[in-house]
Image: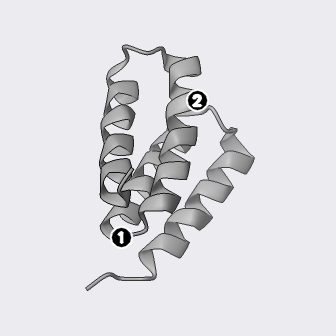
């Protein structure tokens, strides 16, 4: 079962965190990563790749290229791109 309601709930959470905490807050970045993973599981690879690419750019800038969370984002983006066929 794909549970279509998960994605809208994650988008809503992300929108609130961006507005309240800001786009570079660790909780906002976690919501972005979580939503990217949900989109991969739903087979929405292009959408996941866009979001995970944005997440990776912010994490590189804020956390640095060698931070574990940044490295995890690289891996997640690679999964989305490989499943999309890039």
Q: CA distance from mark 2 to mark 1?
A: 24 Å
| Label 2 Cα neighbours within 10 Å, binned few <14 / some 14-19 / many ≥20 | some
2 or 1: mark nearer the eye: 1
Q: Secondary structure at mark 1?
A: loop
Q: Is residue 24 above or below residue 1?
A: above
Residue bearing mark 1: 43
* Coloring applied to the structure: one colour
The residue shown at (43%, 68%) is: 44
Query: Of marks 2 and 1, which one's residue comes earlier in the chain?
Result: 1
| Label 1 Cα neighbours within 10 Å, binned few <14 / some 14-19 / many ≥20 | some
Q: Residue furthest left?
A: 1
Count the marks: 2
Q: Position of residue 83 (x, y in %)?
A: 31, 58
- Asked whether, in this view, residue 32 is left or right of residue 38, the answer is right
Q: Nearer the viewer, residue 44 or 9?
A: 44
Marks 2/1 in contact by CB < 8 Å: the verdict is no
Q: Which image quadrant: the N terminus?
A: bottom left
Q: Position of residue 4 (x, y in %)?
A: 42, 83
Q: Secondary structure at mark 2?
A: helix
Q: Nearer the viewer, residue 15 or 43?
A: 43
The residue shown at (35%, 61%) is: 40
Q: Is residue 84 above or below residue 5?
A: above
Residue bearing mark 2: 58
- Asked whether, in this view, residue 49 is left or right of residue 16, the answer is left
Q: Position of residue 75 (x, y in %)?
A: 30, 37
Q: Position of residue 57 (x, y in %)?
A: 56, 30
The residue shown at (58%, 40%) is: 54
């Amino acid at each position: 079962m794909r549970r279509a309601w998960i994605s809208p709930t994650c988008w809503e959470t992300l929108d609130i965190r961006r507005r309240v905490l800001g786009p570079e807050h660790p909780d906002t970045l976690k919501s972005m990563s979580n939503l990217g993973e949900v989109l991969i599981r739903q087979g929405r690879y292009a959408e996941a790749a866009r979001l995970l690419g944005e997440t990776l750019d912010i994490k590189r800038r804020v956390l640095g290229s060698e931070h574990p969370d940044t490295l995890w984002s690289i891996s997640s983006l690679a999964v989305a791109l490989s499943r999309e066929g890039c």
